[in-house]
Amino acid sequence: LAKTTQPISMDSYEGQEVNITCSHNNIATNDYITWYQQFPSQGPRFIIQGYKTKVTNEVASLFIPADRKSSTLSLPRVSLSDTAVYYCLVGDTPYGGYNKLIFGAGTRLAVHP
Amino acid sequence: EAEVAQSPRYKITEKSQAVAFWCDPISGHATLYWYRQILGQGPELLVQFQDESVVDDSQLPKDRFSAERLKGVDSTLKIQPAELGDSAMYLCASSLAAKDRPPERSYEQYFGPGTRLTVT
């Protein structure tokens, strides 16, 4: 199973850009990289997903280098409402094509005024 | 926007009692997941359904936990008997994942608000 490593916590201030890097040295050829966000007392929410290079949506950007052994989630100009836990996941397909998400402890991002 | 529904939102029960949680996935989502999340940790997959069939229950403590999705729509997760260590948030999620669909779609899961279980 591909395992991910990300910082336990990060602090930032409103208006700054936040980059959270995740390492996944054993990523398999057909694995996708996915990021989720979770607020207290809520279920996780899908943010972004990518396979290689760069992906951007209305919420974030995801940068994946050519070797795919790491990825960086970029949140532009964060606000207080971006305070949450961010999970980096690498998909695993052990059961005949049914992909499985393995959540780690995530990165607790605290945005300060 | 369609959402995954779960009930109850909160449940307090005594150890050795039975407890059940209900989940209604987003309409049209073939795959349904039950996760358990202990405070301070990430969600852990307990069971995954494809329609009415279980495709992964490797982490489900089968001596006390059971899950069903009889008609391939809503699902129930049961614990009997409950133990103190079962206190956690129980999350249900659904996705469009299916064997005949692009694999990347299965990583986009939609989570419900969860059921907070406290066992005393």
Image (cartoon, coloured by chain):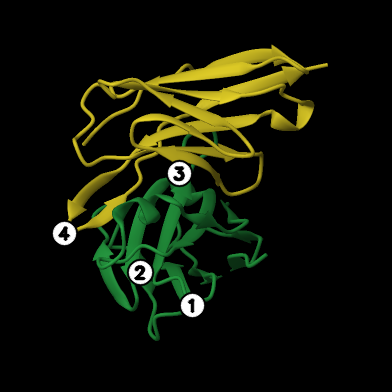
Give the distance between the C-alpha atoms of the residues marked 4 and 2, in whole angstroms.
23 Å
* Chain A drawing hue: yellow
The chain letter under disc 1 is B
Please name whichever residue, B44 or A6, is drawn nearer the observer in this view of the structure. Answer: A6
In x, y percent, where is residue B68?
37, 76
The chain letter under disc 3 is B
Q: Residues within 10 Å of mark 2 (few under 14, many from 20)?
A: some
- Judged left or right of residue A38, residue A12 is right
In x, y percent, where is residue B56?
25, 60
Residue identifier under label 1: B74
Q: Are marks 4 and 2 in contact (CB under 8 Å)?
A: no
In x, y percent, where is residue A49?
44, 40
Residue identifier under label 2: B66
In x, y percent, where is residue B108?
45, 52
Name the secondary structure under disc 3.
loop
Same chain, marks 4 and 2? Answer: no
Give the distance between the C-alpha atoms of the residues marked 1 and 2, in whole angstroms.
14 Å
Q: Residue furthest bottom?
A: B71
Same chain, marks 3 and 2? Answer: yes
Name the secondary structure under disc 1.
loop
**Residue found 39% across the figure and 50% down from its top:** B107
Q: Quadrant of the C terminus of chain A?
A: top right
Q: Earlier in the sequence, mark 3 or mark 2?
A: 3
